[in-house]
């Protein structure tokens, strides 16, 4: 039986590896998330409040706003909105793909090191550092 090296990790060593942060850090992060959510929610409520105030003050009056609203109302925005949504979704997807590749690439060396320490005889899947399939396998 082969002797384990001193720096080889075991499954027991890796079990709690993901979340070993002190309790205070977790509390601060959760408070930060809650505050960000409250700010975003409050901004949405403030927006709709101010829009309703503006509409109330303009009710029954003929203004430039009525002329602009009539012009905008005569345009067909459904196709424009559909195209804007499509372009936005494609841009979002491309950004997420780029982010995933960058993240996998950044973590690649660390994960490979941990896997090698856990099992020095481990064989490689030969994936690219970005997580893509090896071109020889396609």
Image: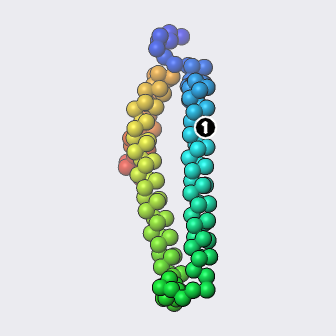
Residue 101 in percent (x, y) is at 42, 47
The residue depicted at 46 percent of the width and 53 percent of the height is 96
> Residue 130 occupies which quadrant of the picture?
top left
Write the residue at 62% across / 60% down: 45
Q: Position of residue 14 (x, y in %)?
A: 56, 24
Within 10 Å of disc 1 (Cα), the crowding (few <14, some 14-19, many 20+) is: few
Quadrant of image for the N terminus: top right
Along the viewing direction, whichever of 88 and 10 lies nearer the viewer: 88
Residue 40 in view (yes/no): yes
Q: How many marks?
A: 1
Q: Is residue 19 left or right of residue 94?
A: right
Q: Is residue 11 visible?
A: no
Q: Is residue 81 above or below residue 89?
A: below
For image coordinates 45% across by 47% down, the residue present is 100
Task: Report x, y in % for residue 10.
Answer: 56, 19
In this orientation, which residue lies closer to the viewer: 136 or 29? 29
* Nearer-the-camera pick, 16 or 3: 16
Up-down relation of residue 80 to residue 8 (above or below): below
Residue at left offset 47%, top offset 10%:
6
| Element on which disc 1 rests | helix
Q: Give the left or right position of residue 125, taking residue 60 as reference.
A: left
**Residue under label 1:** 30
- Using the image, determine if residue 85 lies above or below residue 13: below
Scheme of colours in the image: rainbow
Is 122 left or right of 53, judged from the image as shown? left
| Quadrant of res 53 | bottom right
Q: Is residue 108 above or below residue 6?
A: below
């Amino acid at each position: 039986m082969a002797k384990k090296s001193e720096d080889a990790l075991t499954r027991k060593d890796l079990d709690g590896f993901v979340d070993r942060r002190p309790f205070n850090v977790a509390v601060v992060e959760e408070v930060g998330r809650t505050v960000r959510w409250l700010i975003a929610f409050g901004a949405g409520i403030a927006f709709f409040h101010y829009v309703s105030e503006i509409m109330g003050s303009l009710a029954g009056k003929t203004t430039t706003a009525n002329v602009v609203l009539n012009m905008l109302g005569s345009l067909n925005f459904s196709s424009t909105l559909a195209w804007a949504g499509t372009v936005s979704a494609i841009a979002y997807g491309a950004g997420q793909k780029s982010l995933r590749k960058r993240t996998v690439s950044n973590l690649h060396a660390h994960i490979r090191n941990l896997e090698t320490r856990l099992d020095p005889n481990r064989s490689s899947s030969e994936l690219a550092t970005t997580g893509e399939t090896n071109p020889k396998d396609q």
